[in-house]
Image: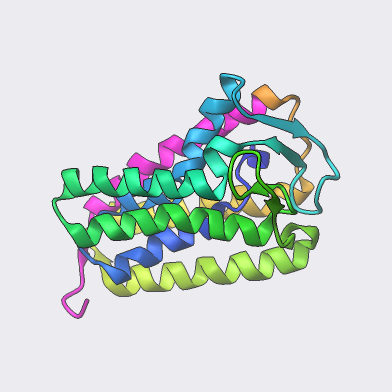
Amino acid sequence: MPWSYNMFVGHLAVALAARKAEPSLPLGASVAAAFGVDLLWPVLLLTGIEVVRVSPHDTAFTGLAFESYPWSHSLLMVLVWSVLAGLVAKGLLGSTRNAVIVGALVTSHWVLDAVTHRPDLPLWPGGPLVGLGLWGSVPATIAVEGALLVIGIFFYMQTTSPKDRIGSLGFYGLVLLCAAMWISQPWAPPPPSATAVALGSLVLWLFVPWSQWVDNHRVVRRAA
């Protein structure tokens, strides 16, 4: 179901790179924050609060038309979710620095989406729509998002090293699966329905415990 994941590796890249900014921040928290509004989005789709439409030629890279998602993806609401995520992180992790980074990761989702989406991202519910439209070009999308992924992997591997085979193979498996789902989007068949998109997108929740499982089998390098 690769059509569900949009700028998948770009958000993963930011989560991986955050470990360089703060080595004590668990990868599971980074992934949950960087993907945060996309974890909320399918729930709002299934409840009918937000709307997506299958449109195979909406952009060159993805065949989804994001008709209404003001509560998960408008800039104003993303900033609200950022503050709430930061407060939760403060309570769970006990670190103001980690809380600030978690909040920034949630905000980064909107920034990256604004680069890739056509003008369909609202600044606030009912407000003007923005988007630079990187998805209009498959080669440009692969180049930009692929570069982000390489940078994120570099920073994460520079900051941590595996303690065992799970820390090594589990990490490579995570990255390769994400990359495969992402890069197959332009050539994958369209989803059968908007409900299928929502259900497929719920798979994103599995990557939070997976990333933390991998992170538990890695150790911060002394130089970091």
Position of the N terminus by quadrant? top right
| Residue lying at 44% horizontally and 68% vertically, measured from the top left | 152
Looking at this view, name the residue that lies furthest to the left. Answer: 94
Q: How many marks?
A: 0
State whether the magenta stretch is mostly helix, strand or loop.
Answer: helix
| Residue lying at 73% horizontally and 24% vertically, measured from the top left | 193
Location of residue 55 in the rendering, given as x and y in whole percent from the top left corner: 82, 37
Residue 87 is one of the magenta-drawn residues:
no
- Depth check, front residue: 42 or 9: 42
- Compared to residue 80, the image places residue 53 above or below, namely above
User: In this image, 195 relative to 23: left or right?
Assistant: right
- The image quadrant that residue 196 belongs to is top right
Q: Is residue 224 visible?
A: yes
Looking at this view, name the residue that lies furthest to the front. Answer: 127
Location of residue 149 in the rendering, given as x and y in whole percent from the top left corner: 52, 65
- Depth check, front residue: 81 or 65: 81
Location of residue 138 in the rendering, given as x and y in whole percent from the top left corner: 77, 61
- Depth check, front residue: 141 or 111: 111
- Depth check, front residue: 158 or 116: 116
| Residue lying at 55% horizontally and 27% vertically, measured from the top left | 44
Location of residue 116 in the rendering, given as x and y in whole percent from the top left corner: 67, 58
| Residue lying at 38% horizontally and 45% vertically, measured from the top left | 32
Question: Residues in magenta?
Answer: 196-224
User: In this image, 78 relative to 195: left or right?
Assistant: left
Residue 199 is one of the magenta-drawn residues:
yes
- Compared to residue 111, the image places residue 181 above or below, namely above
Q: Is residue 163 visible?
A: no
Position of the C terminus by quadrant? bottom left
Looking at this view, name the residue that lies furthest to the top. Answer: 47
- Compared to residue 38, the image places residue 180 above or below, namely below
